[in-house]
Structure formats: structure tokens, C-alpha cells
Amino acid sequence: MSQKQAPPTASGNNPRGDVSFIRATPTGPFPPQSPTSGREKNTGVAPYPHPPAPHSSAAVMAARGVEVGGVGWSEREEMLSRELEEARVRVAQMEKTMRWWSDCTANWRDKWNKARNERNKAREENRMLRTRLDASIKECSSLKRGLRAAKTPTDSELPVKSPAVDDSVTKGEKEKMAKDFDEKDTDDLETVTSEDRLSSGPPDVVGLLTKTGRADGASGLIDENANDSESTATEKVSLLQLHEKDTLTRTIEQLQGELSSVRVKCDEIKQSKQELIQQVAKMREDHQSELGRLNLDLEDESSRTTSMDRRLTELRRELERLQAENAAEWGKRERLETEKQSLERENRKLRSNVNDLEEQLQRKHQQAAASVDSDLRTLQFDLAEKNKELTELRHTHNKLRKTMSERVTELEHTKRRADQYEAEVKKLRARVEELKRDLATAEDEVDMQANSVRRLQRSNDELQEQVDNLTVQVDHLQNRLRRGSQTLPKTRSSSLKSFNMEDSAELADSEDDLEDT
């Protein structure tokens, strides 16, 4: 008999299909499970235990130490119910594992989408930073060109405006300082524009240009004042030179401080650039490692899904085979039940026939209790034999009941025994027919005896009537004799003698007739 489980059950979010049709799995201990991967250890979800190979009902019962013939229908139904419960539990566990696999695939899909979005965002930011860097480089180059264009007219105008020797010396010093400052500023600007991705350089360059313009304007004013005061006094010139030197020193100090601050900013920008490069490299490495891990997880998941699909197909084939076996076993069981019912019907018929025979015999016994003792003894002996046969039939019936359980797994043997039982039933029917014939003969004998009793009764009644008639005649004769005793004593004695002789002869004849009958 197949091992059926109901499972039970419909799959909730099963991506591979509905498994609610599964109603049976074989019983027995679970096989050793495959080693779990890192994801299963981290998630804490137990993998689905693969069911063992299906077994037949006889093999399962033999493994449990139970003989097939000795198991009753109730015990087998309990076993089937337990197997159904186990099947439902297994189907529920399978549904949980399928839901777990679907959730895992959804989670990994979300993670992959997030990583891809982050990668796209990083690419967009890198592209924007490159465009900004190109724009800042272009702005710096344009500012350099403007600065050089602004320098050329000032350099050409300064020697023309110097009338005196002192003024020429001071102007030469100014030009040297301005050239050195411009070279330093251009070098700093080149380093800033070449290394900085952010557009933080142009405002500093603009500030430097404004400051150099102020210095040039101040020098122009000093030159004009010197030209105007040539006729006044040399003291004013010296004072103006001193004032100009003071202003120049102050501006130089301011420019040096600003230059140091710009250099500090450049160093900070370099450090931030290096940090950003390191972060980008680290992010790339992390991204590559994450991509490799995701690819490995996806490969593991695809291999496991394929193995689960193969396992599901195998389970479906096993279920179909078990369902076919169950249908065949149920057909066998129904046939055996029909045979059992037919045997029970025949037994009931036999019992009813025996009861009828017993009732008939009791009636006959009551009717012919006084006259047919010997026949009654024979009938009682026959009844005892019939009772013995009935006990034998009951014993054989019990044996048949016991063998019914053995016929579950031995169909061919049951067919042979069924033929034997049919032969025995035919013999019993023949025996019953013989008993019926014996009963009919016994009834005929009882009827004959009753008829003989009735004939004897009639003859007895006739004899009684004759005796009564004779007594009446004797009374009449005695009266006559009494009346004629006085006249004919001799004749009376002779007549009486003759009469007594005749009566004795008649009585002897009647007794002979009775004995003959």
C-alpha cells in the first residue's frame, strides 16, 4: 500500500511553481544534508532536507518489524494518517524553503540594482568633475593671457616716465620686484590650475591682479608727484621715496602673506586630491570585490535552483508512481472486501438454513415426542453432527478472517485459496443438500409413522366399538338368561359355552390382526 501524505498545501510566493498537489512522501529518517554555504550560515535558514527514495508498504512494514499479515485495518489507517501528517510537514518545509529562495533572489536583485545605481552615480560625478576641471583650466589659461597682456604695457611705459637717475633706480628695482612677483604668481597659478579639480583658483588670481594693479597705480602716482615736485625740493622727493618704499614693503609683505596662504591652500588641495584618489581607488576595489561576490552568489543560487528543479521533477515522478500504486492497492482491497462480504452472506444463509432446520426439528420433536424416540435419537445424532459441522464451518470462517489480512500482500496466493474456498463452499452446499434430502426422508418416515399411529388408533377405536357392542350384547344375553333360567337351564349352559367359544375366537382373530399391522 502506498505511503500517502496530503500535503497539503499551496505555495505562497513560489517562483518555481505550485507544489500544493504533493500529498505523499515516504516515511523514514531524513538523509544526511549537504553542507551549508556562507549565506545559509549567516541567514540561519536550514536547507531543505532531500526526501529518501520511496519504499513499498511491505518493505516499510518489514523495516519496522511488523508482519504484513498481522496488521489490522485500524493500525494501517493510523500508519497512513501518521504518514499524511509527516507529508504535510515536509510540504510546509518545502514551501518555506521555496519562499526563502525567492526572498534571497529578490534581496540580491535589490542589492545589485543599488550597486549599479551607485556605480552610475559615481561615473556621473567623475564626468562632472572632469568638465569642471576643464573649465577651470580654460579660465586659468585665459587669466594668464590677460595677465601677460596687462604686464606688457606697464613694462613698456615705466622706463619712459623716469626723468631722474634716482627715479630710474627705484623704477628698476620696482620692475625687478614686480617681475619676480609675477613669475612666482604665475608658477603658483600653474600649479594650482594643474592640480586642482575644483574651481577655487580664479578668485585668488583675480585678487593678485587687483593688488598688482594697485601697486602699479601707486607707482604711477609717485612718478607724477616726482615730476611735479622736481622744481620744489629734493626733500619732498626723498620723503616720497621713503613713503613709496614703505608702501611697497607693506604691499610686498601683504602679497607674501597672501602667497603663503595660497600655498597652504594649494597644499590642502593636494592632500584632499590624494585622499579623494585613494577613496576612489578603495571604492573601485570594494566595488570589484562586491561584484565578484555577487557573481559567485548568483552562480551558487542558479546551481541550487537547478538542483531544486531536478529534485522537484523527481518528487513529482515518485508521487505519480505512488498514486498509481495506491490506486492498485485500493482496487485490491475493494475486491477482497467484496469477496469477504460474499462469504459473510453465504455464512448468514447457512446459519439461517441451520436455524430453520433446528426449528423444524424442534417442531417435529414436539409432535412425535411420544412415538418416535429412536428416530428422535437419530435426528439428535444428526443434529450433533450438523453442529459439529457448523463449528467446523465457524472455525474455517475464523481461519478465513485471519487469512484475509494475509491476502493483502499475497494476491496470487489468495486467488488460489479463494478457489479452494469455493470448492469447500460447493462441498458444504452439497452437504446441505444431502442434509435436506435426509431431512425430507426423515419427514417422510415421521409422516408414515403418524399414518400408522392413526391407523392403529382407528383400529383401536373400531375394536373399542366392537367391545362396547359385545358388552351390550352380553348384557342383553345375561338378561335373557336370567329371564329364561327358570325354564331352560340346560339349554342355557350349552348356549353360554358356545357363545364363550365364539367370543374367544373373535378376540384371538382381532389380536392377530393387530399384531400383523
Image (cartoon, helix red, strand yellow):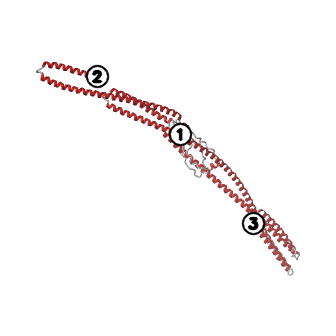
Q: Residues within 10 Å of mark 3 (few under 14, many from 20)?
A: some
Q: Amino acid at mark 1?
A: Glu
Do the CB atoms of the residues marked 2 and 1 lie less than 8 Å apart? no
Residue 312: image location, x then y, percent? 61, 46
User: Please, what secondary structure does the residue beneath circle 1 have?
Assistant: helix
Furthest-left residue in this view: 486
Give me the C-alpha separation between circle 2 and circle 3: 164 Å
- The part of the image, by quadrant, that contains residue 134 is bottom right
| Residue at mark 3 | 200
Looking at the image, tell me whether mark 3 or mark 1 is earlier in sequence order.
Answer: 3
Residue 302: image location, x then y, percent? 66, 49
Q: Amino acid at mark 3?
A: Ser
| Residue at mark 2 | 515
Q: Does residue 14 lie above or below 77 as drawn?
A: below
Of marks 2 and 3, the one in the foreground:
2
Residue 498, which numbered label?
Answer: none
Give me the C-alpha separation between circle 2 and circle 1: 76 Å
Q: Residues within 10 Å of mark 1 (few under 14, many from 20)?
A: some
Q: Quadrant of the C terminus?
A: top left
Looking at the image, tell me whether mark 2 or mark 3 is earlier in sequence order.
Answer: 3
**Residue 257 visible to an observer of this rendering:** no
